[in-house]
Image (spheres, rainbow, N blue to C red):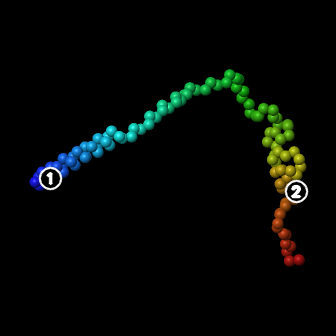
């Protein structure tokens, strides 16, 4: 009797394993279809039809006009304004420093 019980348990275990594997195989999730990527335009862009002008300055500028041609001191045309006013007083300027005389 012991052999018969072992065979029955073995057959039932085999049938259950076969059923579980078949159910797992036929119910597996299918991945969603990915859309094809859009084609990329690899053509070179067309250059505009115009003449090339080589120049060494910006258009509309000259060295005689105020503010053009690298005017020194920040390019301000008003006295005492902007970067040109820094350090333009008569003589050296020390802000926050007190001069101390020698022993008198």
- Quadrant in which residue 45 is drawn: top right
Q: x%, y% of residue 85? A: 85, 52
Mark 2 Cα-neighbour bin, 10 Å: few <14, some 14–19, many ≥20: few
The residue that label 1 is drawn on is: 5
Mark 1 Cα-neighbour bin, 10 Å: few <14, some 14–19, many ≥20: few
Residue at (22, 49) in percent of width and height: 13
Residue at (85, 37) in percent of width and height: 65
Q: x%, y% of residue 74? A: 81, 47
Label 2 – label 1 distance at C-alpha: 115 Å
Is residue 69 found left or right of 51 in the rendered image? right
State if disc 1 and disc 2 touch (CB < 8 Å): no
Is residue 1 found left or right of 23 in the rendered image? left
Residue at (39, 40) in percent of width and height: 29
**For the residue labelled by badge 2, is the local secondary structure a helix, a strand or a loop?**
loop
Tell me: residue 30, above or below residue 94: above
Disc ID at residue 36: none
Q: Give the camera-side residue of 54 and 8.
A: 8
Q: Give the camera-side residue of 1 and 76.
A: 1
Is residue 22 found left or right of 32 in the rendered image? left
Tell me: residue 6, above or below residue 58: below
The residue that label 2 is drawn on is: 89
Residue at (52, 30) in percent of width and height: 38
- Residue placed furthest toward the bottom: 103
Q: Nearer the viewer, mark 2 or mark 1?
A: 1
Q: x%, y% of residue 28? A: 36, 41
Which quarter of the rendered picture does the C terminus lie within?
bottom right
- Residue placed furthest toward the front: 1
Tell me: residue 36, above or below residue 25: above
Q: Earlier in the sequence, mark 2 or mark 1?
A: 1
**For the residue labelled by badge 1, is the local secondary structure a helix, a strand or a loop?**
helix
Which quarter of the rendered picture does the N terminus lie within?
bottom left
């Amino acid at each position: 009797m012991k052999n018969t019980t072992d065979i029955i348990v073995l057959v039932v275990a085999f049938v259950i394993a076969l059923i579980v594997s078949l159910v797992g195989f036929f119910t597996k999730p299918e991945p969603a279809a990915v859309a094809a990527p859009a084609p990329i335009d690899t053509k070179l862009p067309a250059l505009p039809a115009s003449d090339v002008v080589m120049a060494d300055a910006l258009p509309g500028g000259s060295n005689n006009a105020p503010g053009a041609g690298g005017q020194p001191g920040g390019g301000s045309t008003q006295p005492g304004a902007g970067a040109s006013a820094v350090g333009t007083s008569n003589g050296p300027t020390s802000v926050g420093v007190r001069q101390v005389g020698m022993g008198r």
